[in-house]
Amino acid sequence: MTGSDTRPPTLEQVANYAGVSRATVSRVINGVQTVDPELRRTVERAIAATGYVPNLAARSLVTRRTDSIALVVSEPENRGYETPFLTRTFTDPYLGRVTAGAQEVLRPLGIHLVIFLADPPAREHVMRYLRQGHVDGALLISSHVDDPLPGQLVDLGVPCVLSCRPGQPVHTSYVDVDQRAGVRMAVDRLAGLGRRCIATITGPLDMPAAQDRLAGFRAAVAAHGQTDVPYVEGDFTRGGGERAARTLLASHPDVDGVFVANDLMADGALRVLQEAGRRVPDDVAVIGFDDSTAALECHPPLSTVRQPVEEMAGEMAQLLLTRIREPGRSPRSVIFNPELILRASA
Amino acid sequence: MTGSDTRPPTLEQVANYAGVSRATVSRVINGVQTVDPELRRTVERAIAATGYVPNLAARSLVTRRTDSIALVVSEPENRGYETPFLTRTFTDPYLGRVTAGAQEVLRPLGIHLVIFLADPPAREHVMRYLRQGHVDGALLISSHVDDPLPGQLVDLGVPCVLSCRPGQPVHTSYVDVDQRAGVRMAVDRLAGLGRRCIATITGPLDMPAAQDRLAGFRAAVAAHGQTDVPYVEGDFTRGGGERAARTLLASHPDVDGVFVANDLMADGALRVLQEAGRRVPDDVAVIGFDDSTAALECHPPLSTVRQPVEEMAGEMAQLLLTRIREPGRSPRSVIFNPELILRASA
DNA sequence: TTGAAAGCGCTAACAA
DNA sequence: TTGTTAGCGCTTTCAA
């Protein structure tokens, strides 16, 4: 009944059915213009009648293209975060935005986007998958300074583009937001609100993005004459934000402004601040980073530094396509401008 | 410098290098036992020396296997949820758990898991990808009653397994949790706590899982002699939970127990209840569903009905593998038992 | 145990 | 404009 023990129809069979050569059917399928309209019609009927679907393996064996690219989220090793990798990844709106942005440019081109999560146990598999020519290239979300994956992929000749400044120099393109400029906007705002004790909750400091934001914070508060640089390291999760906020409150009870390195942690921090009896923004003003959907769900809605993630992902896709088409061309990176979005929290 | 204009080494080249035939190299690669240990050594050296990696396309052209299976998350059409599909999907810990569970069984077998999101714009692409034989089968997360995808895939002969009871009868296996039993446990607990006005916040009622949970709720409260069945429809997101809780509070200010159809909504509901001055669990007891990571992040920590998602996903993978190996065999479905996890909220 | 040879289904020169 | 033909890189009989 399931009846698929029989093989799917081949080009050859369609050709026989239509009474033409394989080459002609191939041309019709690939939209080559030099085919007699009448014949094309005949072939199309034959395709419909036989239910023909091209065999991808056969095609890519000769074209050396697969028309699909991978989105790889990588984590070099278990750093004892409270939340495991998969949970963190699938709980943060970030990946959804990246996917959306990449799809936007890939889909019209008929290119498939396949998603891979490369935590240490999966790492080898993903590497093999990419090497075996299953995809034409990879968009790499690699956030840790010491992640060897980007370097390895480049060495293997897999075209790729990174989602942010790589921790170690890698001969490949990347896309990033001007982290420091973003933080600067946030701190300027807090200072403009008259806050005198401005602190920050950082991301994991083994991530370039987190380092950049902390460095930006240092520079920004210094510019406003604040000599102390109170910071607590978080992990970019809601729970981490809560923990960090508690630590911060204990060490700096007089804090009146907080720049939190992402929205998820800001949400957690907001909860803790308010449970501790601080009014936001009156007692403590809070600004996040990302402008993800989480920012809108905060109570009160979160002021935040907007990162145009979708656009950035689209650009990554473009860069990758270029890289695939012209492997010789030298890497090019694109830096986007952040924007301060003001809501109720600061 | 990037130097990959040159083609990767082929089996043939490795064979020449090692001074043996292609067949022998192939045997070594595929772990065939009948190869002289000495020769095997030679070949392995040759493989290492040349940096050989099998060409997947060529292999699967002959074996008709790809050793990869797809995890497809499907949504039939835009139902005007507040939160868009990708955001919802990548914000809910559910998918991470499914991935983890499936990987657990697939990885040791050397099978790749590739993730696809099939919302309406991507749908056609994903279908094509699956039909073209890019994967050996698919794990399908399809939550809507009227999603045609499962039926279409089955018709196309793509082996698949569903993540819950399908809305329409489909000739394929699925895995599910005993929804009604789970809800029953929750309601029994609330009733046991002496709650007299027990309400529920449901998932989208065009999802079988949401329907089952509501039906289970009906039956359970009736069993405790509560004739009224107060419910508000939610959307399985945090924000949706907040909105639903507000509605509920307005229509049933005397509510003292709430069963919320998933943890994310329960988190939102908790916030709203508390902002409205209700103490949890004293004034209102709340129980969620899933036992996802969100349950632990709630304030107070959420009592919830545990669904063994990882295990269920592992079983899906097993079922799919069986289905791939023995296409003739008739579909088999597996129902898991839920478990009530008591924390502070009820 | 090893090798020779025949394809898997497709695209792309090249000829006609 | 169409058809013929030669592979793409691999696995797998079948002989040796």
Image (cartoon, coloured by chain):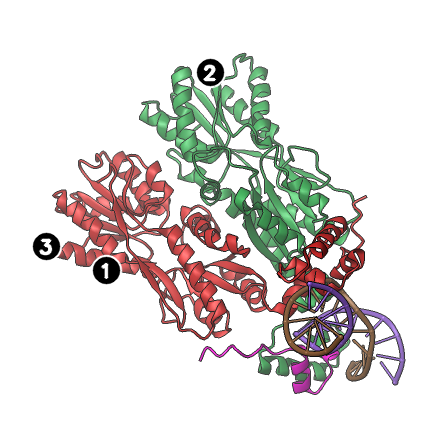
Chain colours: A red, B green, C brown, D purple
- Find the magenta span and give its range: B1-24
Between marks 1 and 2, how big is the CA–CA gap?
54 Å
Residue B179 or residue A46, whichever sits in front: A46
Query: In the picture shown, does residue B225 fall above or below A225?
Result: above
Name the amino acid, label 2.
Cys
Whole-percent x, y for residue A110 in the image: 55, 55
Name the amino acid, label 3.
Gly
> Disc 2 designates what residue?
B197
Q: Residue at x 36, y 70 (%)?
A: A168
Q: Which mark is residue A215?
A: 1
Question: Is the residue marked by circle 3 packed among few (<14), some (14-19), or many (20+) residues within 10 Å?
Answer: few
Residue A8 or residue B74, whichever sits in front: A8
Q: Does the magenta stretch include residue B11?
A: yes
Q: Is mark 2 on a helix, strand or loop?
A: loop
- The chain under label 1 reads A
- The chain under label 2 reads B
Question: Is the residue marked by circle 2 packed among few (<14), some (14-19), or many (20+) residues within 10 Å?
Answer: many
Q: Is residue B31 among the parts visible in the rendering?
A: no
Q: Residue at x 33, y 38 (%)?
A: A296
> Disc 3 designates what residue?
A225
